[in-house]
Image (cartoon, coloured by chain):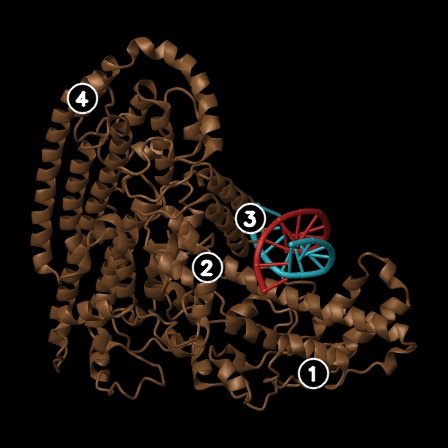
Chain colours: A brown, B cyan, C red
Amino acid sequence: MPDHDNATLLARQTKRRRVDIGVKRTVGSVIFTRARETLLDRMNPTHCSDQDGDCPLVGHGHGSANGDGEKSNVLRKLLKRANSYEDAIMPFSGATIISQLLKSSIGKNGGSDSGFQGSGALSSGGSEIQNEDACSNSSRDQDSPSDCLSPGPHHPPPSSSSFGRPQPTSNHSSSQTLSLSTFDLDRLSDEHLRAKRARVENIIRGMSHSPSPGSRGGVVGVAEVYRENKRKQRLPQQQHSFTQLVCSRQEQRQEERRQLKLQLEDMQKQLRQLQEKFYQIYDSETEEEEENEEDGNLSEDSIRSDGLEERHRDRGRHGHDDLSDLDPGLFLDRARALLREQALIDGDLEEDTDSRGEEERSGDRGMKRRAAAGGGRQLAETLKQELNCAVSQVVDTVVKGFSSPKQAAAHHGCHSSTPAAPTPNYHSNQRLHCFGDVIVPSPLDSFGGLSGRLSGVPTPNDQTEALPLVVRKNGPDNTSHTLPPPPPPHHPSLHPSPLTASLGFSPPSFRHPFPLPLMGYPFQNPLGSHGYPPGPKDHHQSSPDSMDITREAVSLRTKMASLGGGHMGHHHHRQSSPNQHGSESLSLSLIKSECGDLQDMADISPYSGSTIQEGLSPNHLKKAKLMFFYTRYPSSNMLKMFFSDVKFNRCITSQLIKWFSNFREFYYIQMEKFARQAINDGVTGAEELTVGRDAELFRALNMHYNKANDFEVPDRFLEVAQVTLREFFNAIVAGKDADPSWKKAIYKVICKLDSEVPEVFKSPNCLQELLRD
DNA sequence: CCCACACCTG
DNA sequence: CAGGTGTGGG
């Protein structure tokens, strides 16, 4: 696996990552952030330089190739100390240990590893160079770098030893070469046999499925493994151990991946069965028949034709065709492909409420929907849940498989997706949540994520937190001391859109039994036509390595955000098709919710644009700014109302709140600045201060919140600004600014001057309506 | 304890 | 604009 990690990159990446984490920082959960950082730091093998090289074979085997003198020094020191250990171990090192290892390894073939790993033998029998290389290499496998530094017997972290298969014991003593080779051969043939079997199984499975790029992976992957093993044997002795260790690890991973893939395919099968079941019954209830039976080709074609293909091509660079064996992301791709397939199969039925794209689809689907809404609803719901369950299993499996080095449990119950217990694992919990935040919601959140909000059923995310400064005005009961109650919302183009009207209470009428957003999951790169091209970094997404994931993740949030740019108005309509049962995304709770960083998803969901924005887009920012003209202190509930196309979680809420906080900051700074300036200019009475549209103060503000000046700022804002300015003026004149908290009083006043935000702002595509050309 | 907030910093 | 921090209210 090519790895372009180097110290600088890592450093930069860590830096950016910090930022990213910070962005996602949940207010009040600094601890988590710090914990994650700590863990990350420990995971970043900054001291292990990394040559490129998949399973380093010939290149840099003799240590001299490592131009890292610092490391060598360290190692020398360590070796010095280690020598003393070695002396103690001596009697047991060499053949004795090796034969022991061999015994245990052979005997336990198929069992779980005892934790007695090849690297353990390394330090006793091998040279320091091996140690070093094993270290730098194992670090690629996410071993803690600290292992490299620990002198003496090398104790591999449990994480690396808990892959499914037992580790073939590495043997490095020259006196054991012969037995080693025979053992190796045995192992290889064993491996080969198993691979063959897996291949056959794959083929058999594949026959009932539509062909997909992933299904070829097993075959090629096996060949790859075999070839690598063959190459391994030609290695110089010194490298032998280390390489073997590495390769055996890779084998393990590949094996694991194969298993996961099998599971995935099982899931796929189940999905299809469910699907077929559904159609049997469903079609019997539907008078007219559709021609949506060519799903096989259809889905595959479309999978190929969308962004996925690009990704595959990317990955192909290092994986040839054995993508599914080598690439974690591909599993998720596959999972998504399943969804996609599902979507396409049901595509005809999709209720596309997009007003723009509506016309092309002749409205002949209505009948079906009606039928579905009829007697079959119960069944549909059941099927839906089962489907959801199946999908969840797939996702959970994959997630588990790759979020933790531990072997994913083979089978989960329908609701087993809840993380068993918070583990100290770097990947679990927080990160997983975020993981889900990104990937899952696109197709799956629509199962229930939105419905709660839209139907008024509180979701776990709904906040009922206390309101800032003063009691939130939840209505037109604004009682301003200095100003008359704010006029009704006004704007030239402020007419509640029909969509807006239906947002709050979309009738649970005819719904397709399958959540429609699932089907409509847009797999094509939504950025394509919308000016937010994937950054150059996107092309680095070739390595499945976690480090790569980490690297890619940095821009993800931005990417995610940019997905919304120009898109928020196009898909939000699907919101009107939530299912009625908000609990359907239950099993996704694992990956839903909360934030964290987006690392895991960088590699997995670069194109996860969908109905509900996972992040806040530039357009959202713009909208927020415009909203600031009406409300300076929006409650989070209000924000949820007005950013209904965003999947809210604590992070999003916090970010929005932060935005407004920043807006206020700027606002008040300007106020203070201009107030002081007025005082300096000799203004004596607050009455002299007015804020008109030509006022400098206003221009400054407008420049900030309405840079393009394409929004007509409500007069009310001018009034509020004027009041604020005068408040500041008076306070300063009165010398209150000596009090450290002198602004608080002003804030208290200003926060009462919020007006109602026009309804249009609730429409996700309000910008189009709001902005004058 | 969580959250919103202001403040400061980059 | 975001990150971090301290504060204060619930």
1 or 3: tag closer to the N-terminus: 3
The label shown at residue A716 is: 1
Viewer-proximal residue among A73 and A349: A73
Marks 1,4: beta carbons within 8 A: no
Residue positioned 44% across, 64% down in the render? A559
**Residue type highlighted by circle 1:** Arg
Q: Position of residue A369 (x, y in %)?
A: 23, 79
The label shown at residue A555 is: 2
Helix, strand or loop at label 4? It is helix
**Residue type highlighted by circle 4:** Thr
Helix, strand or loop at label 1? It is helix
* Disc 2 versus disc 4: nearer the observer: 4
Q: Is residue A449 above or below residue A371?
A: above
Viewer-proximal residue among A390 and A314: A314
Q: Position of residue A20 (x, y in %)?
A: 51, 55
2 or 4: tag closer to the N-terminus: 4
